[in-house]
Amino acid sequence: MKSLEQLPLPLLEWYRDNARTLPWRSDPTPYHVWISEIMLQQTRVAAVLDYYRRFLEELPTVQALAAVEEDRLLKLWQGLGYYNRARNLQKAARTIVEDFGGRFPDTYEAILSLPGIGEYTAGAIASIAFGRPVPAVDGNVLRVVARITGDRGDIARPETKSRMRAALLSILPQSMPGDFNQALMELGATVCLPNGAPLCRRCPAHAFCAARIGERTGELPVKGGKAARRVEERTVFLIFFENRVALRRRPARGLLAKLWEYPNEPAPAPCPVEAAALADGPAGKHIFSHIEWRMRSVVVQAAGPELPPGWVWADGEALRAEYAVPNAFRSFAKAVEERLK
């Protein structure tokens, strides 16, 4: 991967002039870098900024994260999706408090041992917060490396990732590994784009990028196809009584574990409560990694306050402040809000 050897100096110069100003870069403590990296997984930077600010206002330290009630943690995370990320954050925080005396571990190996932290996140924290000379290889970085080197290996395969990680380790500037890793991420996020044409004229690797020279940016990186998603038709019941809406908690394991939801069942499904009136509500769709929910809703005016065991009535304030309802039900939020005004 000789073309990669030419990258460090022009990349770092480009990053110095083009890096976005982001709060976790302005104050790169281990805790801040960690929270930002977990939030940014499969989420755009613009969507994370407000979550990051609110999260740190309420949970400014590892100790605060370790101690917070899970329901409150999930409410702070509501809208970011992939809620196990938040649960693993708390598991890791408790490990840091119990096993590391409340101090964030400062080696790649120790960071990698924490719950919910993989090679990429461990590399990002170790290099950015502690200056450890280790790569941080995410999808953006794999795409950049594949294009610069012309590597046609499937980036979804472990051997391709290992090969690229080793190549990056061999060129990593020992004195500024954090800047180098962030520069690679920034290049992939803002210039060497995943969808549509990359902005090659803005790229510091323009002169030696194999994909640009060979006009193969549309072919690289190579990534194996994903399995087809299973489609589920579901009926969602928006059940109201005296300016409150019915919620139930999902099971402790599985999809959207332990989050609150509007009652729903595989379609077709009978109304689960005695109804005074029924009407069609909005439709919705939500795509998970392996399942697609196609949902129709039924607006139910309940005949009385009785609910199945474990269900609750929530007014508008409780829905906003207490109950974490996942984005899968975003299509119904407006209809619910209008009824709870």
Image (spheres, rainbow, N blue to C red):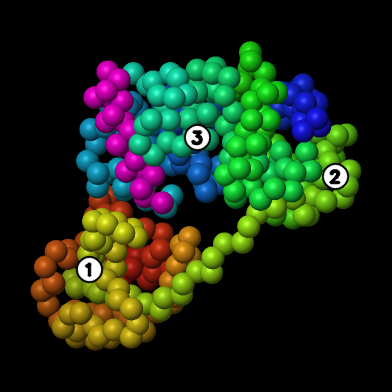
Give the image location of residue 52, x and y in percent: 44, 37
Q: Residues within 10 Å of mark 1 (few under 14, many from 20)?
A: many
Name the residue tied to disc 2. Answer: 212
Relative horizontal placement of residue 297, taking residue 38 as reference (left or right): left
* Residue 94 lies within the magenta run: yes
- Furthest toward the front, the residue is 159
Q: Position of residue 125 (x, y in %)?
A: 49, 26
Residue contact between numbered discs 1 and 2, judged by CB atoms under 8 Å: no
In the rendered image, residue 292, in percent from the top left (x then y), is placed at: 46, 70
Cα distance between the residues tagged 3 and 1: 42 Å
- Vertical order, 229 against 72 (above or below): below
Depth order, front residue of 45/40 = 40
**In the image, what residue type sits under mark 2?**
Arg
Range drawn in magenta: 82-101
* Residue 58 percent coordinates (x, y): 32, 34
Residue 119: mark in rendering? 3
- Helix, strand or loop at disc 3? helix
Question: Residue 311 occupies which quadrant of the picture?
Answer: bottom left
Crowding at dot 2, Cα within 10 Å, few <14 / some 14-19 / many 20+, comes out as some
**With 124 as the anchor, is 274 left or right in this view?**
left
Q: Relative to 186, say whether 340 is above or below.
A: below
